[in-house]
Image: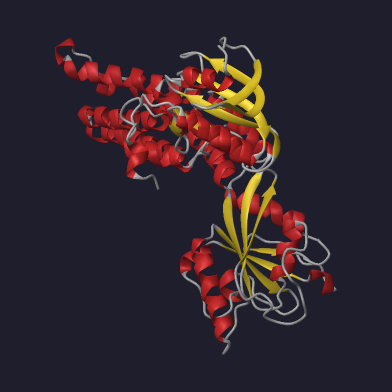
Amino acid sequence: MCSSACSTTLTGLDTDTIAAIATAPGIGGIGIIRLSGPQSLAIAEQICQQSLTVRHAHFCDFCAVNAEQTDVIDSGLALYFKGPASFTGEDVVELQGHGGPVVLDMLLRETLRLGARHARPGEFSERAFLNDKLDLVQAEAIADLINSGSEQAARSALKSLQGEFSRHLDQLAAQLLQLRMYVEAALDFPEEEIDFLNDADVHNKLEQLSSTLSTSVQQTRQGTLLQEGIAIAIAGKPNAGKSSLLNALAGYESAIVTAQAGTTRDVLREHIHIDGLRIHLVDTAGLRESEDVIEQEGIRRAYKEFDKADLILLVCDASEEKGKTAADCWPNPPPSQQVLQRTLVVKNKIDLLEQKSENSQEVCHLSARTGQGIDALRERIALHAGFQGGTSSPFMARRRHLDALEKAAQLISHGHAQLRELGAGELLAEDLRQAQDCLSEISGKVSSDELLGEIFAGFCIGK
């Protein structure tokens, strides 16, 4: 969460000059110090010991100047971008030197000594948003692009950064505004005898808007899956093949696999991708009655993971388990009904069976040892998530975007029902207004300081 200091600039533009290391921590060939604010040029020219021309690469020494002498810290390129033609909309300077942590820290300390202050996480992007250089969706896409875990996620984040999602929202908002203006005009001027309650055009436009929002919700759900992924917990009795399944899905020996029962005592986590879909995979302790205090704790933690997971893979030995549903196959103690509804039974060790087994809606057959049926399980996981893989990726989105669009769709549907069943034009107008506020909240045109603080606090320091 953001501290109280983090939200101090969200209601207005800060006049401080900020500085930060803009490259990743560690040793590299190049390291960048970024400055933004009214004193950026003056600070940089003192460090470079020369005047800087706009959008010109200057090769120079970076110096620390004091009363006694001038010490050279590093040498490299200095780039000056004059506001508002810069990323933040303010004067911005980048000092590009060598990527040593000590050298970069010395250079950063010199910028702070000359009057800059250390930037907060995401403050450069925050200033770009406050200066109307990008909207909130584009600002979030910067962090998503940096943190993308697959090519498809990176392409989708870039589409959002380039404004594809924002343009889509603008089109939705324009369509909604046009309908809202017509409805409110009819309410405000009843003497014109515009019987909009029986106007088929209004009903058609409401249906079109609902259809467009439904498509938007589906596309946004795909983008949300790309950004967040889904959590999957692997459950089952000891020696059912849970750890073997984890290794098969991960593609390498992540978990210890032995013939001894109860090898896994704690929660083991892996992060994988299935056709671009991010999977947060959790292997858990074998479920059985035990007097071992450590094993009991492992089982307790396992049930906590089941409650949080989007999908539970219940692994059973195909040669021993005869049940055909999750309720039949789940060992004691049984989970909650909500967990049962999110359970997919995985019958393992089919390579030891003489007879071929067929998959069903609730049961998937495979061999974690040989890999037989693993691809089919991957397809079932993507199907459960509602994820549509492929090269044509949707724009990147976040959970708050999806929640806002779903709420807008519900409001449109509710308003249409009020008009159709009760002739309540005033209630329709209010639902249309609230739906428009939902769309504005996504782009940041209507956003609370608390929301903005939470979003930008999750960024890198140098962004």
At a point 63% along the width and 73% down the height, the residue shown is 236
Residue 164 in view in this figure = yes
Rendered view: 67 above or below 26:
above
Residue 21 in view in this figure = no
Q: Nearer the viewer, residue 401 or 424?
A: 401
Expressed as whole percent of the image width and height from the top left, the position of residue 349 reads 78, 71
Q: Nearer the viewer, residue 128 or 417?
A: 128
239 left or right of 232 in image: right
334 left or right of 194 in image: right
Expressed as whole percent of the image width and height from the top left, the position of residue 74 reads 65, 29
Expressed as whole percent of the image width and height from the top left, the position of residue 31 reads 64, 32
351 left or right of 139 in image: right
* Residue at the extreme left: 191
Expressed as whole percent of the image width and height from the top left, the position of residue 143 reads 54, 36
Q: How is the image coloured?
A: secondary structure
Q: Nearer the viewer, residue 404 or 10?
A: 10
At a point 32% along the width and 35% down the height, the residue shown is 8
